[in-house]
Amino acid sequence: MKIKQVVMRQLKLDLLYPFVTSFGKQYDREFILIEAISDEGISGWAECVAMVDPFYNEETVKTSWHLLEDFLIPTLLQNEIEHPDEISEKLFSHIRGNYMAKAALEGAIWDLYAKKQKASLASLLGGTKKKIDVGVSIGIKDSIDSTLEVIQARLQDGYKRFKLKIKPGWDIELIDKVRKAYPDIPLMADANSAYTLEEMDRLKALDDYNLMMIEQPLAYNDIIVHAELQPKLKTPICLDESIHSLADARNAIKLGSCKIINIKIGRVGGLTESRKIHDLCQEHGIPLWCGGMLESGIGRAHNIAITSLPNFTLPGDTAASSLYWTEDIIEPEVTVENGTITVPDAPGIGYEPSLEKIAKYTMYTKTYK
Ligand SMILES: O=C(O)CCC(=O)c1ccccc1C(=O)O
Ligand SMILES: [Mg+2]
């Protein structure tokens, strides 16, 4: 497979509602869209999930652009590959870190490869599910009452799992009131590393509410502290920020740092690495779900494809396009019915990027040959 050219576009989409986490408030989503074009003129698409600020992880839109422009795209253009697995295993293996930048280019090649094979991306990755279960991630709100209103609306939409962002002070009372209002809903909390072991009392208090899991309570870069915490809680710990690779997943499982893992394709360097983590977790009885990074439809489509693998047994964060954007940049948009998304079987990502809508939200474009 020979790549003739790569187009990088920087887009900005306004969020319908600001998204607040323990690390900040976000009003819009700036991101890099990658289009890789083969010598026969087929386009593969993916998006880079790095944010403008280095608050979720260390990568940013600008660091990703730099890595893509100066290292990753030139390496890809100079080498011919037979299969997308070679990208992480050979082409990019000498470049450290920068997983979101690597995953973006690899993802575009996976879509292109699948389109060439006239197969869906989901099927080529080993996906078996025709429909995937989805949940929602609910940011920090001004009041508990407004959180309850959002839960009620999403419950009516059919979502299958409710994730609330928490931080010290926006935690025990919130979970208590939500549990009293909804004793049986599948409920979980995501701390985005807002706690330390000093706050054990708060974490212990959350242990009494039958949460499905608590996501990344402690430091983003410390699986040892999570291994200390997990045996002290009944609630399963799910790691997000701490897992960047197959090796990280293996270490976390060995140490007992978590009982569940959230896979984000960008955070682990791509679809090939995601599939390897999937297989390892399946062998060890560690359930998975697919996390979200406020993606446009293109990233959302990649998430749907990986979620079709059998060990993604828990509902993920890939909600409908209409919860994020006034209009999405793919056709059709991602829709949720009875809490499920139907995995498309059209070639590649299975949704058509709308060139017209993409142009409308593009701030900057550059082509590499
Ligand atoms: O709806 C989504 O895309 C997931 C939202 C979400 O929880 C999130 C959004 C941005 C950065 C980190 C996270 C997270 O899962 O920790
Ligand atoms: Mg998270």
Image: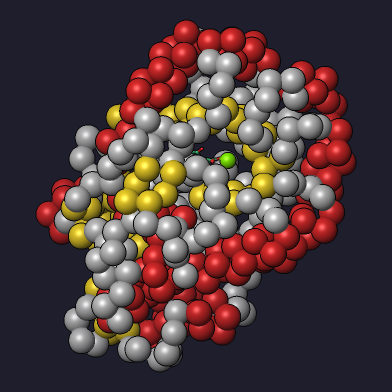
Residue 240 horizontal side relative to residue 361, left or right:
right
Q: Nearer the viewer, residue 182 or 365?
A: 182
Which residue occupies 72% across, 38% down? 236
**Residue 97 % position (x, y):** 61, 65
Quadrant location, the N terminus: bottom left
Q: Is residue 98 visible?
A: no
**Residue 252 % position (x, y):** 77, 55
Q: Is residue 158 visible?
A: yes
Decide: is 2 above or below 152.
below
Which residue occupies 24% across, 58% down? 351
Which residue occupies 44% across, 65% down? 127
Residue 183 horizontal side relative to residue 105, left or right:
right
**Residue 313 % position (x, y):** 55, 50
Decide: is 226 above or below 130.
above
**Residue 304 % position (x, y):** 39, 54
Q: Nearer the viewer, residue 160 or 147?
A: 160
Decide: is 336 above or below 310.
above
Residue 320 horizontal side relative to residue 58, left or right:
left
